[in-house]
Image (cartoon, rainbow, N blue to C red):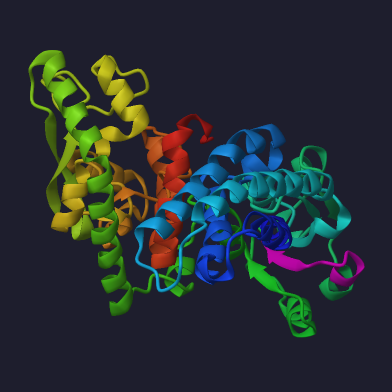
Amino acid sequence: MTLDILLAALAWPAAAGLVLRDVPAGLRPGFFAFVLFPIACILLLEACGLYRREALLDLRRAVERLPFAVAAGSLLAAMALLALPLPFPSQGVELLFAAAVPCFMLTGILARCLFYPLRDRRGLRRRLLIIGAGGRAHDLVLLLRREAGTLAYNITAVEVPSDGPADPRLAAGLGCRVVPPTENYLHLAQAVAADEIVFAPDERRGFGMASLIACRTYGYPVRDYLGFLEREIRRVDIKRLELGWIVFSEGFTRGKLDQVLKRGLDIGASVILLVLSAPILLAAALVVVWQDGGPAIYRQHRVTKHNQVFLMLKLRTMRQDAESAGAVWASDGDPRVTRFGRFLRRSRIDELPQLFNVLKGDMSFVGPRPERPEFVAELAKTLPLYNERHVMQAGLTGWAQVNYPYGASLNDSRSKLSYDLYYVKNHSVLFDVLIILRTLRVVLWPGNLVR
């Protein structure tokens, strides 16, 4: 993102000046119009997933999405400028649009061409010193290699006597440097030029903290395993979750202002989306009725905040007798789903009636996805902290939905819970806006989510 912003800041004044050179000074778009185009394009790059790990690793995927993101961002900026009453002249907006598309296309391609040869250079690699070389350290490094936003690490893992021998997979499979036990972590941190120290031994009892205190007071950031991993992969590690960490870590705060802003975002986003999607929703409902004569809207009991049950609205995507034998997990290629229903599910059009649930207050626009009461009772028995996801209202979209593919099984629910707990712990209105932006990528490229 930094490269995109820097190159856009350098190129956009020249491109805008070139197309507006013949427009009289008093009729040129104002400063707001000038800055709105690059801001809109950067937001659409984010919405289309061009700053996600898979796009940063795959130049072809990034370049494929770039034209749509730039064109959509430029179009939205132009439409906003033409529609909103502004206190300054708006002539020349069409010229700015014509300049923005090629300008930001070129800067976007150039930014990625510069980034890819630089990403593995030493200066862009983060140097980590991990205290521990057992199973916990292995899990940490494995998750960093697979999911972290940072693409390259130099990792040194130091053995801890209480853990026993080092996990051989650290050096053989994950390319970590493993060093023998030491009592002077400060000297080791200086030797490897560590940017950060992560405390991740398998056995903490009896561990002497004096050397780590020396590191901390010397200025090295020292992080706990769970807190560090949460920040890096942006979800909670359910496998090694410690209840004490949940109790004493920061987060889970929701002030009155946040609640008011969130409700305002819910209402504003739902009204806008309902107005824009009304023709699509009406046409889809007519097709659902036409295909088998059954009702277009399907009502289903779901669980929301404080385990309250409500009737969630969806366009019907299954046969009318789909649950004649009782509630069953949906699955990929479910034979109960109609042919048109598969299209509705892939495009997420079947979720649009839930906007009425959001306006009513049963749901929020962003939050953990609501589950059926029968499945909630089953999952709460198996997954620790599953009911804690219900401290917030269920959402039309959510952090799990933009990071994890569709699935309906115990393992899928466990993985989604790791994202839901992260959302509940770190909720903010700005986080909601980010999730709404990223939902566009899920709608347009649903097959690009990875497990």
Where 405 falls versus 161 (above or below)? above
In front of the other: 80 or 391: 80
**250 left or right, relative to 141:** left
Q: Is residue 198 magenta?
A: yes
Q: Quadrant of the N terminus?
A: bottom right
* Residue furthest to the bottom: 217
Q: Residue 56: x, y in percent? A: 68, 44
| Relative image position of residue 138 (x, y in whole percent) | 69, 47
Residue 129 shown in magenta = no
Which residue occupies the foreground of this view, 107 or 213?
107
Q: Is residue 44 visible to us here?
A: yes
How far across and down, in percent of the image, does residue 276 sit? 27, 44
Q: Residue at x 16, y 40 (%)?
A: 313
Which residue is rendered at x = 32% and y = 29% of the image?
A: 345
The structure residue drawn at horizontal position 20% and vertical position 22%, both measured from the top left corner, is: 318
User: Vertical placement of 109 versus 421: above or below?
Assistant: above
Is 301 in front, or is 226? 301
| Apparent side of residue 9 relative to residue 87 in the rendered image (left or right) | right
Seen in the picture, residue 68 relative to 380 is either above or below; the reply is above
Quarter assignment of residue 81: bottom left
Residue at image coords 23%, 47%: 275
User: Residue 301: x percent and y percent?
Assistant: 13, 42
Q: Does residue 166 sit above or below 205 in this rendering?
A: above
Q: Which residues are magenta?
A: 189-200
Give left or right: position of 273 versus 34.
left
